[in-house]
Amino acid sequence: MPENIFATRGKEHSIFKDERFLYPEFVPERLPHRDAEIDSLVFALKPVTEKKKPQNSIVLGKSGTGKTVVVKYVLKELEEFSDSARSLYLNCFEFNTRHGILTEISNFLGEPTPRRGIATDEAYTRLLNALKRAAFTPIIVLDEVDQLMYGNEASKLFYDLLRVVEHEKARFGLVLISNDFSLSARLDSRVKSSLGQQSILFEPYSPQQLKDILRERAQYAFNANAIDAEAINVAAGHAAKLGGDARIAIECLLRAGRLAEKENASKLMPEHLKRVFAEVDAAGLRKYLDELSEHEKQLLLLIPSNSSINSGELFKQYKKSLRNPLTERSFRSMLSRLESLSLINAPFTAKGVRGRTRKVSLIVPKEALLRELGKAK
Ligand SMILES: Nc1ncnc2c1ncn2[C@@H]1O[C@H](COP(=O)(O)OP(=O)(O)O)[C@@H](O)[C@H]1O
Ligand SMILES: [Mg+2]
């Protein structure tokens, strides 16, 4: 019998040692350039190891700045270090209702709570009872929490969590993660002082920092000498241009490595990277655009391709272009959101009454935008 093709073919490829080190969900042992952010989280959570109440944190930063990976890493270390802590990670894309989140937390605390068939207040009561009995301190992570912020649900949920946190006997830690910087401002002050005792800001990575991160990951993912030194620089440069997003940089390396393997190249070269950029950028762009409302998409399309526009002027055009335009306030929050998704740059200018004027320009190429939104001619 001939040998199985999976055993015989593909042997000659020698680019990857183990490509799993480049997967988005992989949590590495070392996270260059995030020491200060890690320290802040450790400081907030350390009391748990002494059976005391932890501090709650809000983690803010644009996408690809390492928020999710840093939080997961710190919680992994905490659970290894101390039996008294256990963490639950919930992504609000998936768990996007107050009811869903409360029942998920109750279940985690060992109180079997069906997702359906019980009232939300009942789910809350069960959560609180379970918490009083729990032999460990739960640390709950709500990632992408901006997904919740657009509904009424969110404020009710935050109010529930506030009551949990402020409950005298209950030890309970909360980490909220958001791409949207305006999250902090949108929380009511009591919620903020209790649920966000500290805010940790994640700045975009510089080209040099991206290089360090990629080098670290590449060392485990690729065989020795299978990646050209210049390739790392090219990937880092590309991601830096797109807003310092490490996810893009790593994704490019993975795809370029696969391309190089498929073509039986002996080394991953800058040329392989350049060939995957368009594909990676389009995939990333699509993911962001899927999150936008129709208003946000329309606004995005009004921004010129190769120059900037003043926010005042943009608002005028925006009002003209729509039959039912939104208020200036929601216009401003849309700008912040587009900025937090790294679709636009919008720095405040020194000029302008009350310093409200922003200089708005596109980060993503307009052609790609038109193509993805189906507006290309
Ligand atoms: N300092 C770092 N060191 C190593 N890998 C990093 C670092 N920061 C981010 N990454 C990687 O970049 C990708 C994006 O990070 P992620 O935590 O998902 O960003 P965010 O949650 O801010 O959008 C992930 O694959 C992550 O492992
Ligand atoms: Mg994340």
Image (cartoon, rainbow, N blue to C red):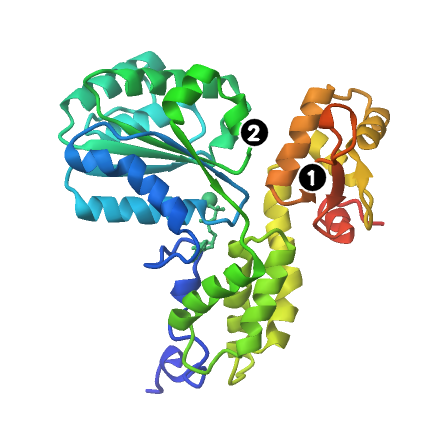
- Name the residue located 40 percent from the left edge and 21 percent from the top edge: 193
Residue type at mark 2: give it: Ser
Give the mark nearer the N terminus: 1 vs 2.
2
User: On the image, numbered disc 2 is attached to which residue?
Assistant: 182
In the rendered structure, the answer to whether residue 118 lies left or right of residue 177 reads left
- The quadrant in which residue 343 appears is top right
Residue type at mark 1: give it: Pro
In the rendered structure, the answer to whether residue 349 lies left or right of residue 57 reads right
CB-based contact (under 8 Å), mark 1 and mark 2: no
In the rendered structure, the answer to whether residue 131 lies left or right of residue 150 reads left
In the rendered structure, the answer to whether residue 147 lies left or right of residue 123 reads right
Q: Position of residue 121 (x, y in %)?
A: 33, 12
Q: Secondary structure at mark 1?
A: loop
Q: Is residue 42 visible?
A: yes
Q: Position of residue 32 (x, y in %)?
A: 41, 58
Looking at the rendering, in which quadrant would you find the N terminus? bottom left
Distance from label 1 to label 2 (Cα)?
15 Å
User: On the image, numbered disc 1 is attached to which residue?
Assistant: 347
Task: Report crowding for label 2: few under 14, some 14 to 19, many 20 or more residues within 10 A (C-alpha).
Answer: some
Q: Is residue 302 visible?
A: no
Q: Secondary structure at mark 2?
A: loop
